[in-house]
Amino acid sequence: MKRKFNIVALVLTLLLLYEPVDSLSQSWGGAEKNRFGDLWSVNINSGLTSYYGDLSLYDTNPVDKLSKESGLGMGLQVSKYFGSAFDLSGQLLFGKIKGHKDELSFRTKLFEYSLQARVDFVNLLSEKKNHRFHITGFAGVGHFLFDARMWEYEAGDDNVSEEVSNVPEFVAFAGGGLYYMLSDNIAVTTDLALRRSQNDKLDNYTKGNDFDYYTYLSVGITYYIRTFIKKPPKNKATIVYNHSRMKPLKR
């Protein structure tokens, strides 16, 4: 399972990155050259991070998973577009997970920073039309830090142990999402991604050789920025001529 997940994530990332830099859609300015300062977006999102590991009980019950083994998550994502269907994004994610099994209970805080490649399947299949509804897929890699605290209840005693990551841990993930264009510059989004950590201590409990997983289900809003580059001023002679037509010269 681990090997298959790594292979799928790697292949999808490479496929998403394979796209000529200068291609653009109708809605992003026609055939103009795509400069580094052109075609960006900022997404702010919030949702739930959910736990899958040695102490999880509700992996097949989505309602209990979200209510009993999940916590609040918040994210910020900045994207650079290479055409209408492909983009490369950097993301910051803050999340919480929790769980309880037998006499053990834990709560964990997460902080993740990652890089991901995304593909817009609707624009990929029909680039020339301006669509409102879109379906996306993405894959990426990154690092995360965590602070896990466990409580063990035994014979009336409450023993607390804590596990803090001193160095960033590796994480690979893949997922999909939807977004709907409210206007030319604003969209509402929803994403779901499965994240596989290279660590078995997200719950501060180690059993076997399987690493822990977590997911992030989010809704957000995206603001699109056509360009950060200021256009050069018009020809000075044209400016003087237009100004003289607007305001008659004083005698």
Image: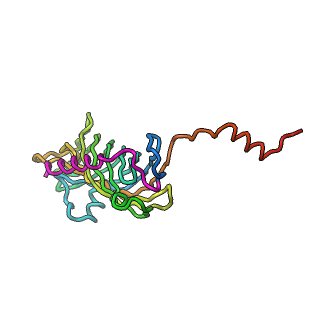
Image point 30% across, 55% down: which residue?
A: 137
Secondary structure of the magenta portion, mostly? helix
Image point 45% across, 44% down: which residue?
A: 33
Residue 93: x, y in percent? 35, 46
Residue 237: x, y in percent? 70, 38
Residue 120: x, y in percent? 35, 56
Q: Is residue 170 left or right of residue 48?
A: left
Q: Quadrant of the C terminus?
A: top right
Residue 72: x, y in percent? 36, 53
Q: Is residue 23 magenta?
A: yes
Extreme left residue here?
Answer: 208
Point out the stretch of residues depicted in magenta: 1-27
Image point 43% across, 63% down: which residue?
A: 131
Q: Residue 135 occupies which quadrant of the picture?
A: bottom left
Closest to the observer: 174 or 104? Answer: 174
- In this orientation, does residue 156 appear? no
